[in-house]
Image (cartoon, grey):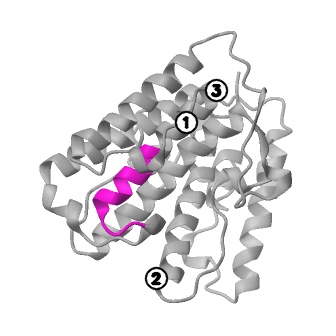
């Protein structure tokens, strides 16, 4: 959610006011982010290669990534954590059956 | 202007990560014996064999070359495992730099673990699958080492990579 807001130039929801739960409230963050991303994809004025992304938690003098890099970062960030989560629940005796390999996804032919 | 991440960028990120882990285990060889359990492996060295062996297998598949026998991949030492990555990286690099290479051409992998509708896929999907497979295992490995008390300092976030501005 936060990265969709950053890339879109929207006000950033502070970590302190994120919901702690229940699950439905947490999952709602995801479709909200998707909605923001879709809107920015449809924005013909978006300059994806401009080093313009301001991350509020980074030092002001730190290099600014492009929106293209920020987008790649956030999409890969989720996948890396899903991999960790699937290992965690499996090691605790609750295998989820998550098929994380892209090969097993219908998202790309 | 491309919004998406290019194959060259994914490959460069993969290379960056592989070199980090190789360097980390060259400096900390005892960690190779840590119990693992990721990807059906018994220890960290076996996980490296899995990650880099799979890279080579997918490089061969993507290039349309005969596959290697998984059982014939070296079990070690580390430099023999890293050589699997270097070979795969060189093959993938050759493909992404070949202007006429048809990434939309399909491959068919007739394996029981793949549902019938997933058995035919583009070379592009094969390539991206290989790249993300490694990154997902690196994320798991970083957690495993940290939980075991040996944090690696791996900066797996793409934002922290030198690849892409």
Residue range in magenta is B41-53
Q: Horizontal placement of B15 versus A51: left or right?
A: left
Q: Is residue A24 above or below residue A8?
A: below
Q: Of the numbered discs in the image, which one, if any, rests on residue B67?
A: 1
Q: Is residue B42 on the magenta stretch?
A: yes
Q: CA distance from mark 2 to mark 3?
A: 37 Å
Dominant secondary structure, magenta? helix
Q: Label 3 lies in what chain?
A: B
Q: Secondary structure at mark 3?
A: loop
Q: Is residue B19 above or below residue A98?
A: above
Residue at label 2?
A: A91
Q: Is residue B131 on the magenta stretch?
A: no
- Labels 2 & 1 near each other (Cβ < 8 A): no
Q: Secondary structure at mark 1?
A: loop
How packed mark 3 is, by other alpha carbons closer than 10 Å (few <14, some 14-19, many 20 or more), is: few
Kindly report which numbered mark, 2 or 3, lies closer to the viewer in this rendering: 3
Dividing the picture into quadrants, the one containing residue B18 is top left
């Amino acid at each position: 959610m936060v990265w969709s807001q950053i890339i879109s130039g929207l006000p950033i929801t502070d970590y302190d006011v994120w919901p702690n739960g229940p699950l439905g409230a947490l999952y709602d963050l995801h479709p909200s982010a998707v909605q923001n991303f879709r809107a920015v994809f449809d924005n013909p004025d978006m300059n994806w290669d401009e080093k313009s992304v301001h991350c509020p938690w980074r030092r002001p003098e730190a290099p600014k990534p492009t929106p293209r890099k920020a987008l790649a970062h956030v999409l890969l960030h989720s996948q890396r954590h899903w991999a960790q989560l699937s290992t965690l629940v499996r090691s605790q005796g609750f295998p989820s059956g998550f098929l994380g390999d892209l090969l097993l996804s219908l998202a790309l032919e | 202007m491309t919004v998406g991440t290019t194959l060259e960028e994914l490959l460069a990120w993969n290379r960056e990560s592989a070199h980090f882990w190789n360097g980390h285990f060259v400096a900390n060889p005892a960690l190779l014996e840590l119990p693992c359990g990721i990807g059906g492996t018994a220890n960290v060295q076996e996980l490296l064999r899995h990650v880099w062996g799979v890279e080579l297998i997918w490089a061969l598949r993507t290039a349309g070359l005969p596959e290697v026998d998984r059982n014939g991949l070296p079990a070690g030492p580390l430099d023999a495992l890293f050589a699997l990555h270097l070979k795969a990286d060189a093959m993938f690099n050759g493909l992404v730099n070949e202007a006429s290479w048809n990434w939309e051409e399909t491959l068919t992998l007739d394996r029981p673990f793949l549902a019938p509708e997933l058995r035919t896929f583009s070379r592009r999907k094969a390539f991206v699958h290989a790249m993300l497979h490694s990154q997902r295992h690196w994320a798991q490995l970083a957690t495993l080492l940290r939980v075991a008390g040996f944090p690696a300092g791996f900066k797996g976030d793409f934002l922290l990579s030198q690849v892409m501005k």
